[in-house]
Image (cartoon, helix red, strand yellow):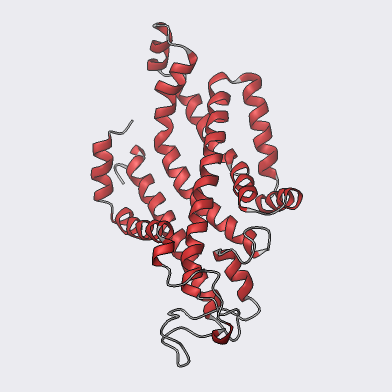
Amino acid sequence: MIKGSNVLRKMRGNKMILFSSIILVITVLVGTFANLIAPFSPYHQELENKLKPPLWRGAGTRIHFLGTDHLGRDVLSRIIYGVRVSLLIGILAVTISAIFGIFLGLIAGFYGGIFDDIIMRIADVQLAIPLILLAIAVIVVLGSNVNVLILVIGLTQWMAYARMVRGETLSLREKDFIMSAYAVGASDLRIILRYIFPNTLASLMVLITLNMALVIVLEAGLSFLGLGIQPPEPSLGTMLSESKNYISRAWWLSTFPGLTIMIIIMGINLFGDGLRDVLDPRLENY
């Protein structure tokens, strides 16, 4: 395992991590304090001010910095609350998939045999089904709300964690320190939790970070298709969906939510790439 002090030192010296950390910190603060930062409620309508352009355009108004939508709702406020929704769904869905996948990966890699065969065949079958189609099928059956969306996304992402943890476990279980733990009478549970799982954390941290970006994009895509967050709830994907009928005369309705998604995903991916460079000892000499 890499010592924590060395990791922090390398992270401070990695410009990619520092730059992406600024983006992520701002994103988290915006999502966390949305109710304090947003100038309006995301549901507040002013029909007399509908489709107002951003402030710097000729017909823009000072109180609606990024303009308004077709119902006169403040675009900036809805984006701020949309960031909160994206982060909430991303964090909870990734937590579900990580816990589920890590557990199954440890079982499959440590015990092998029939456990390994069953778990990996289930993962192979699920991987063979396009992710978006699987999510759509489940949502159509169970209905569309935040809880179902989190559960569906979480349970369609576990395979990556299971396969990675299984591979790490297979390479670790024959190591000398594992054999030594067996020799002194350590139980299977102790060996898994004390010796194997901690040695998978470096790879898991990178995977969790990068998977967060995928989950946020998936949520936005499902909301765009009308299968995720439902109007009038604020969501970046829902805002993009609502803007498609006005794209020729109200470009800001799609531009600013799209830019927000792009910036968030860029920050997460850059952080994940930088974290991989810091945690992967094979990149020490590159």
Residue sitting at the far bottom: 58
Residue 126 in sight from this viewpoint:
yes
| x then y, percent, for residue 286 | 31, 46
Query: Does 123 sit above or below residue 245?
Result: above
Vertical arrangement, residue 220 with respect to residue 246, above or below: above
Q: Quadrant of the N terminus?
A: top left
* Vertical comparison of 262 with 194: above or below: below
| Residue 51 visible here | no
The total number of labels drawn is: 0
Location of residue 46 in the rendering, given as x and y in whole percent from the top left corner: 55, 81
Q: Find the residue positioned furthest to the right.
A: 141
**Image x and y of residue 133, in percent:** 71, 52
The picture places residue 26, in percent across and down from the top left corner, at 36, 60
Q: Which residue is painted at 63% across and 51% down in the image?
A: 149
- Residue at left 61%, top 52%? 146
**Left or right of 82 in this view: 231:** right
